[in-house]
Amino acid sequence: MPYTSYTDLAREHLEGLDYQRNWRRSPVSTLLHLAIHGGGIEQGTGELAEAAAGGIHDLYVFDGMKASGNAELHITSTAFDEPNALALARAATHTVSWHGCAGTAPLTNLGGLDYPLRDRVGLALSQAGFVVQLASPELDGGAPENICNQNTRNAGVQLEISTAQRAAFFVGGDLSRGNRGNRTAAFQAYVGAVQTALAEALVAVGRG
């Protein structure tokens, strides 16, 4: 059963052995990239968030480090209340939350309450050759209490990326921790498409 708070998880697991928290606040940007199910929880999402943030934007990654069984470190997006993540989320003007979902076909499910930015990201991914669709209700990140919607505009973007699509981002389709530094051209193209869409949106509103 998923944990209902970070406090509950931290009570039963050892930081530095079972999981780690990584975050960075940017002095120049109000865009946050979140991967609250990084590491071995939803493999590849932490690497995608880090790459998309680059050295410019705010970043938060909760990294599951267990040799196996990382799924038990899953805290739902509506219950994720780790203090540093919440502080970053509430200070951001724009948020992209990176997630993984099951799926044998390469696919990205688009969600979150920031509909204009969601659609802009979806268009950029589609134009780059990636298959996208609007997320079903169970994946759409539409709850106001979802951490992706906790920014100053109460609206963020949630990307739910299938296992097959995430596997395509790493050499040999190998999602293991030891191989996630070996990234394919598809990884670079995907991140680049998201970055382009975000840059265009932020320039349009004078933020970022």
Image (cartoon, grey):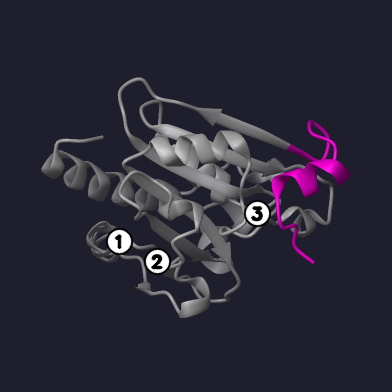
Q: Which region shows up in magenta?
A: 1-19
Q: List x then y, in percent, for residue 69.
A: 83, 57
Q: List x then y, in percent, for residue 186.
A: 42, 54
Horizontal placement of 44 versus 69: left or right?
left
Question: In this view, which residue lies farthest toward the right?
Answer: 12
Horizontal placement of 18 versus 75: left or right?
right
Determine whether 177 is above or below 126 in the image.
above
Q: Nearer the viewer, residue 85 or 64?
A: 85
Residue at figure coordinates x 57%, y 75% from the top left: 103
Residue under pointer 3 = 175
Residue under pointer 1 = 118
Residue at figure coordinates x 12%, y 44% from the top left: 204
Horizontal placement of 84 versus 197: left or right?
right
Position of the C terminus, as image quadrant, is top left
Q: Whole-Å distance between the Cαs marked 1 and 3?
A: 26 Å
Sequence-wise, the earlier of marks 3 and 2 is 2
